[in-house]
Image (cartoon, rainbow, N blue to C red):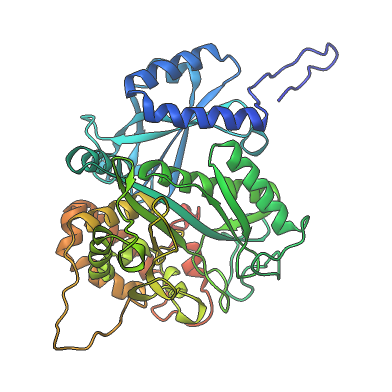
Amino acid sequence: MKTDIPGNGTPLKNFLEIPYDELETLNLEAAAAAEKLSPAELEKKYCAYLQKEKRLKAVTVCFTDIEGRFQMLDYDKQYFLRANDNLTFDGSSIRGFSAQKESDLRLGIDWGSIVWLPSDVFGPGKVIMFGTVLGRDKTVYESDFRARLAALAAEMKKTRGLTANVAGEVEGFVVKGPNAEQAYNEMDGFELISTGGYFHSLPLAPLKNFIDTAAEAQRAMGFRNEKDHPEVAPSQFELNFSHAGVVRACDLVQLYKLVCRQVAANMGMTATFLPKPVSGVNGSGMHLNLSFSKGGKNIFHDAKGEDGLSKEAWEVISRILNHAQELSLILNPSVNAYRRLDPHFEAPNQIKVSSVDRGAMIRIPAGNEKSARLEIRSVAPDANPYLALYALLRTALDGEPVTRDEGKRDRVRFLPGNIYDALRIFRGSDFIKNILGAAPHEKYAAHKQAAADRSPKELGTIVKTSEVLFHHDVTTQMLWHKF
């Protein structure tokens, strides 16, 4: 961005702005380098780049709290270069993140996560990197599930030779007006920008303009886009991008939501990832497509297996189904999420697997030796993706499989119908407590209980003001102190 000084024509600002085609090349090269170079090599590479690139003013370091909120800090570039091994922040200032007695936390840098941002969406002169939250002693903070997911992925690779590959399909709504969530009231509800449906929107209509702009930004950020389109409900969208290793896949989910929110805000609208912002139409999900590979081969594929899946894939299905109710609060973490689990709107509330029934918690898409996978459909778009994948992977590896009583007829089980039942099952689960750790288990439950206590117990048919304003994804931190 260049601003002239009046009278002499000398540029006042000369911050970095990169054309979209160059931006895409840069970001794809960075993603490839992250898979080839060691952390030390990546640090050396990008420190040299930051020192050389005079048009960069700041480095944005981001992390995700236990509920899934995306947190960002901007560090002056020169300060960042001097002090990136000693970055600190006050964890107790983030609602529910850490206690006052453990307020001083550190940020380590994941140098392989660098992303150059489109300047017309985010402003010029910045790059973004993901941070690892550390305690005062520089050990990984137990509530940073990105770091714990990365450690789990490394352990899977080292001890079992397994790589988890994930692609997220994240749906959302675009509604009229900026900050529409903060201004929500249940009498008026959200005002939709489109009355169309699946695949149906004129090329220059507001919804399609939003989708096109967000897709262009994501392509430039190295998402490797696949397809984007209006979804079933009016004003609903979905932008699909390619699979990746489990940590990068979660990073892309968080960046996807950030891009969509920023693009909508730039257009004077709001992108919301509430699971069910509007009654009477389909809600939004975050379908997670999961597969395991070993030695570069997809071990979920077996052409002769049931529905084309291997014995290993069916074992994973059995474990996830067996622990489905205990996982529900992680996969569906809000009061509003349980509105979505309504069988009248293609909602995956049945604890079963199917290749055709979209009401099943797990669907088996048509696949081959490369694309065989499980589509876990009962995940809400407001779930913390790192926590969700960590819990799902631990369940897939260490959970107990479903046991059947041959003398009894199988009955379909269902996911909890409200957050109170989900909380009760979550709190009572020794399995979930063991995989998360006692302190994160209790902390997460306490946050969810606080949100539940601020909303009516009966969902009813109207989306209540409290379930929007006290939703963890909505930036209304001040309201929590006024309740």
Is 397 positioned to the left or the right of 422 in the image?
left
Front residue of 431/76: it is 431
Q: Name the outermost residue toward the right.
A: 7
Q: Position of residue 353 (x, y in %)?
A: 34, 72
Answer above or below: position of 68 versus 327.
Answer: above
Q: Position of residue 60 (x, y in %)?
A: 49, 31
The N terminus, quarter of image:
top right
Is 166 positioned to the left or the right of 181 in the image?
left
Answer above or below: position of 83 versus 384.
Answer: above
Say if residue 437 shows up in the picture. Answer: yes
Mark count: 0
Is 368 positioned to the left or the right of 258 in the image?
left
Answer above or below: position of 40 versus 351.
Answer: above
Front residue of 373/176: it is 373
Say if residue 74 shows up in the picture. Answer: no
The C terminus, quarter of image:
bottom left
Q: Position of residue 292 (x, y in %)?
A: 31, 50
Give me the residue at 36% from left, 18% from top. 41
Give me the residue at 77% from left, 61% from top. 202
Front residue of 169/189: it is 169
Q: Position of residue 302 (x, y in %)?
A: 32, 58
Q: Quadrant of residue 367?
A: bottom left
Q: Quadrant of residue 153?
A: top left
Give me the residue at 37% from left, 69% from top. 452
